[in-house]
């Protein structure tokens, strides 16, 4: 395999200088004499709808998609796209029902919602859980997988790549959310253009032809020769049923995964919390359209890699350290086949995805620690300048922790994407239950929320380790386990809401705020129609 050539480095450094320079210009242009926490953490009022939408995608798409999801495309095919296409539908729901509740009640962090709706104890416990999840699962996974890919493509030392990616992300993050939001527009540009270039050339390699005709014939060849890689719903006989259990992807646990991730996640909602409702909704809808495109960028290359592997290409390059096929190597192997210049562009796209995701995650870690823990329990009298300084310090500390612990997290055992889904799934059912019940049932109380968050986690953990009776839980798909834990949490919360005194802590809700503007309704209808078509065509 060829490593990066001079032209590739020129393209990559152009990307680096463009992002860094634009970020510095945005910081200088929009910085205030006295930087406030709302300005630093939320970029209040300064993000446009296109910046919000781009930032949502840039923060979401990272190494776990480029590396992990392409790896799943190699092994299981188009079915893994359900995470992306269901997310597009979920974003419409979040824009219509979740965002107006947050904005109407002036919610700026997810722990703040829990404190306002329940009590400070629930909020503190959840803040600690979120920090642990964000640092030990998300940040470490992004760094580890990103460095793995960058090292494999560039030939640079793995540890050096981790440190360089973290340093680049810190440079962007310490400028605050306004810098992250606007630089993410450039990141998404490189992500989409570079990603599409990789897909285009990979499919041309499959067909042996050039141009759009090569793409069309390549897709036809993949469908004809590898039809098993072009189905969205897996039957019980499929070896991938445990990961994507049949109709559960449409009717069960997949909704919990997506609604929790896109609607109850500081990392994501933070992009829209500083905007007005119309701007926030338009930005989220823009993100939904971009989500529909993501499988073309991150899944089709994996399927193309499988088709090329089936023809006898890169047999040794796809092997892991244990001598077995490692699907997570599919995307780096493809990049090494690209010509000089385009390889640099695709390399920049991958780096952009990793850095943008790291910056967004680090900013959310900083926000939760500073506003929900430090401000409330440690530095109660701290001024705005001190809080912003603490926020920047937390960014650096969280990156250092992620670098230190990532080699010990077992990320490579199941594949990066699956590792993140299963670990996050231990907390998702209880978190989502506490939010959705808190939104729409006034009698939901703090005891119920506490059970959902702590009890739901313990039940999910017991199932994960097969400690519970009644079934061999290792043989139950994790999405189905998530659905069951969610139902248990809701039932217990409902019972506790009925038998315990009413806390009278409902949110301010006006039914009119759930009615979106006409252009949003038209755009949302197009998104849903496209999802319906894709599932019916690739059933």
Image (spheres, grey):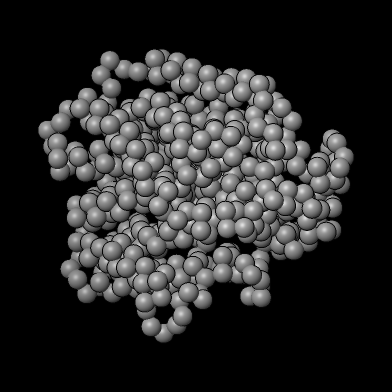
The residue positioned farthest toward the bottom in the image shown: 470
Given residues 496 and 307, the one toward you in this image is 307
Q: Residue at x 78, y 56 (%)?
A: 310
Q: Quadrant of residue 344?
A: top right
Q: Residue at x 51, y 58 (%)?
A: 413
Q: Quadrant of residue 170?
A: top left
Give above or below for 159 relative to 431. above
Q: Residue 113: x, y in percent?
A: 29, 49
Give above or below for 128 relative to 170. below
Given residues 82 and 330, the one toward you in this image is 330
Left or right of 290 in this view: 334? right
Left or right of 500 in this view: 240? right
Left or right of 324 in this view: 338? right
Q: Residue at x 53, y 59 (%)?
A: 414
Q: Quadrant of the N terminus?
A: top right
Given residues 329 and 464, the one toward you in this image is 329
Count of numbered tags: 0
Q: Quadrant of the C terminus?
A: bottom right
Left or right of 28 in this view: 339? right
Give above or below for 280 relative to 122. above
Q: Residue 388: x, y in percent?
A: 26, 28
The answer to whether residue 482 is seen in the rendering is yes
The answer to whether residue 99 is seen in the rendering is no
Q: Residue 323: x, y in percent?
A: 62, 58
Q: Residue at x 24, y 55 (%)?
A: 125
Given residues 344 and 384, the one toward you in this image is 344
Q: Residue 189: x, y in percent?
A: 60, 30
Give above or below for 268 relative to 344. below
């Amino acid at each position: 395999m060829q490593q990066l050539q001079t032209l590739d480095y020129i393209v990559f450094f152009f990307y680096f200088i463009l992002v860094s320079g634009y970020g510095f210009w945005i910081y200088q242009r929009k910085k205030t004499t006295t930087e406030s926490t709302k300005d630093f953490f939320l970029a209040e009022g300064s993000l446009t709808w296109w910046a919000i939408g781009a930032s949502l995608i840039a923060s979401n798409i990272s190494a776990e998609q480029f590396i992990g999801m392409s790896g799943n495309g190699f092994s299981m095919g188009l079915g893994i796209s359900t995470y992306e296409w269901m997310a597009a539908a979920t974003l419409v729901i979040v824009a219509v029902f979740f965002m107006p509740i947050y904005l109407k009640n002036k919610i700026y962090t997810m722990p703040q919602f829990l404190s306002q709706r329940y009590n400070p104890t629930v909020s503190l416990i959840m803040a600690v859980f979120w920090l642990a999840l964000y640092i030990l699962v998300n940040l470490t996974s992004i760094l580890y997988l990103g460095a793995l890919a960058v090292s494999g493509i560039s030939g640079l030392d793995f540890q050096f790549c981790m440190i360089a990616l973290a340093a680049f992300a810190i440079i962007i993050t310490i400028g605050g959310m306004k810098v992250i939001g606007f630089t993410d527009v450039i990141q998404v540009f490189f992500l989409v253009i570079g990603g599409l270039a990789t897909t285009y050339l990979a499919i041309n390699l499959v067909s042996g032809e050039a141009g759009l005709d090569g793409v069309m014939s390549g897709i036809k060849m993949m469908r004809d020769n590898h039809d098993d890689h072009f189905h969205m719903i897996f039957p019980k006989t499929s070896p991938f049923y445990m990961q994507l259990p049949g109709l559960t992807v449409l009717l069960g646990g997949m909704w919990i995964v997506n609604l929790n991730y896109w609607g109850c996640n500081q990392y994501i909602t933070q992009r829209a919390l500083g905007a007005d409702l119309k701007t926030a909704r338009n930005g989220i809808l823009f993100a939904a359209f971009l989500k529909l495109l993501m499988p073309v960028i991150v899944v089709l290359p994996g399927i193309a890699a499988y088709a090329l592997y089936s023809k006898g290409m890169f047999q040794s390059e796809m092997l892991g350290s244990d001598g077995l096929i490692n699907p997570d190597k599919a995307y780096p192997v493809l990049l090494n086949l690209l010509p000089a210049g385009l390889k640099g562009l695709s390399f920049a796209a991958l780096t952009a995805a990793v850095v943008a995701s790291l910056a967004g995650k680090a900013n959310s870690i900083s926000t939760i620690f500073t506003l929900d823990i430090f401000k409330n329990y440690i530095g109660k009298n701290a001024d705005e300048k001190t809080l912003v300084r603490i926020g920047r310090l937390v960014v650096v500390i969280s990156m250092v922790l992620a670098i230190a612990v990532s080699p010990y997290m077992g990320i490579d055992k199941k594949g990066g994407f699956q590792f993140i889904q299963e670990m996050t799934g231990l907390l998702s059912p209880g978190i989502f239950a506490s939010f959705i019940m808190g939104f729409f049932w006034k009698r939901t109380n703090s005891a119920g929320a506490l059970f959902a968050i702590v009890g739901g986690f313990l039940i999910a953990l017991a199932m994960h380790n097969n400690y519970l009776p009644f079934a061999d839980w290792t043989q139950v798909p994790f999405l189905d386990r998530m659905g069951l834990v969610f139902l248990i949490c809701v039932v217990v919360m409902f019972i506790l809401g009925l038998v315990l005194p009413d806390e009278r802590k409902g949110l301010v809700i006006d039914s009119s705020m759930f009615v979106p503007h006409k252009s949003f309704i038209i755009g949302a209808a197009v998104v849903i129609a496209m999802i319906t078509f894709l599932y019916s065509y690739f059933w």
